[in-house]
Image (tube, rainbow, N blue to C red):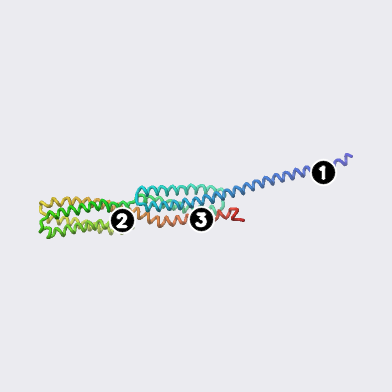
């Protein structure tokens, strides 16, 4: 009876051992599946995060570029500064998102994504360098300031010069006026108004060569005024020469204003910022956005919907 019981116990032990092995296998498989499921969930979550970040980067990138253009076109200093600050804030937001994206891409270590992000980093670096120059130019508004000064203060001092010359001419004897005085006054005023007329092309000039040529004309007209005033001094009687001094003083004031107009115009900040905005900045912004669009397409390919 004892001999027959041994095989029975062995069968039970084998059954228990088989069950235990099966249980271990099931536990290991369950843990493996759980880890695998967790990994897939983590990859899916990371992919969605990267998609969202790239979308936000494209929005803030283009927002910064549009605000920069508005700053360039603004016609007042406060508005230019406000728009430039907003452009910089949008660029800083792009930078923050770029750092967040870099952390995710470094973690996943997918070669195509890493390469595209490096390409974007280089493009974005160039864009920030252009912004540093462009926005400084935009807020200076030297061309607009030169134009306002020419149309306002310079115009008023020129009108004063005209009035003083008219007063002086009226004080001269009729034979003096009819002889050479009238011609000299006309020549002085014509030269003065030509100087103011030349302000506009100087302010609009895009390079130093153009401004140099215009300044030569301004200097020639200035010398013309000086020559006419000297001629009038020689024609006037000693008594009337005192009346010529207010005219000379008014012209000296006009000269000082004109010198400031030329100085501001020489800085050419509005022209330079506009050239940068429509040229290099527009091109580099387009390149950066194209790289992000490509990165977006690469990330989208790895989402479950794209692989079904």
Q: Quick one: SS at disc 1?
A: helix
Q: CA distance from mark 1 to mark 2?
A: 105 Å
| Residue 81 point in image, percent of width and height | 38, 48
Q: Earlier in the sequence, mark 1 or mark 3?
A: 1
Q: Residue at x 45, y 55 (%)?
A: 285
Q: Quick one: SS at disc 2?
A: helix
Q: Residues within 10 Å of mark 3 (few under 14, many from 20)?
A: some
Q: CA distance from mark 3 to mark 2?
A: 40 Å
Q: Quick one: SS at disc 3?
A: helix
- Location of the C terminus by quadrant is bottom right
Q: Residues within 10 Å of mark 2 (few under 14, many from 20)?
A: many
Number of callouts: 3
Q: Residues within 10 Å of mark 1 (few under 14, many from 20)?
A: few
Q: Taking 19 as reference, is 256 left or right?
A: left
Q: Taking 117 as reference, is 30 left or right?
A: right
Q: What residue sits right under mark 1 in the picture?
A: 11
Q: What residue sits right under mark 2 in the picture?
A: 203
Q: CA distance from mark 1 to mark 3?
A: 67 Å
Disc number lying in front (1 or 2): 2
Q: What residue sits right under mark 3 in the picture?
A: 293
Q: Earlier in the sequence, mark 3 or mark 2?
A: 2
| Residue 55 point in image, percent of width and height | 51, 52
């Amino acid at each position: 009876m004892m001999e027959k019981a041994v095989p029975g116990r062995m069968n039970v032990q084998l059954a228990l051992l088989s069950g235990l092995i099966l249980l271990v296998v099931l536990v290991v498989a369950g843990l493996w599946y759980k880890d695998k499921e967790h990994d897939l969930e983590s990859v899916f979550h990371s992919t969605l995060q990267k998609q969202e970040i790239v979308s936000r980067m494209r929005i803030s990138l283009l927002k910064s570029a549009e605000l920069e253009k508005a700053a360039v076109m603004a016609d007042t200093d406060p508005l230019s500064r406000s728009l430039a600050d907003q452009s910089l804030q949008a660029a800083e937001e792009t930078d923050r998102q770029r750092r967040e994206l870099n952390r995710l891409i470094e973690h996943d270590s997918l070669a195509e994504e890493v390469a595209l992000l490096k390409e974007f980093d280089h493009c974005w670096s160039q864009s920030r360098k252009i912004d540093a120059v462009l926005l400084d130019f935009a807020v200076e508004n030297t061309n607009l300031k030169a134009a306002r000064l020419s149309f306002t203060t310079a115009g008023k001092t020129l009108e004063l010069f005209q009035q003083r010359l008219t007063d002086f001419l009226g004080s001269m004897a009729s034979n003096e006026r009819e002889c050479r005085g009238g011609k000299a006054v006309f020549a002085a005023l014509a030269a003065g108004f030509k100087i103011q007329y030349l302000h506009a092309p100087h302010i609009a000039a895009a390079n130093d060569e153009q401004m140099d040529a215009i300044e030569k004309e301004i200097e020639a007209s200035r010398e013309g005024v000086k020559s006419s005033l000297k001629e009038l001094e020689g024609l006037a009687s000693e008594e009337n020469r005192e009346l010529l001094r207010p005219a000379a003083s008014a012209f000296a004031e006009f000269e000082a204003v004109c010198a400031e107009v030329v100085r501001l115009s020489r800085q050419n900040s509005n022209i330079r910022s506009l050239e940068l905005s429509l040229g290099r900045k527009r091109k580099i912004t387009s390149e950066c956005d194209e790289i992000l669009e490509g990165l977006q397409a690469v990330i989208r390919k790895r989402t479950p919907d794209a692989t079904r």
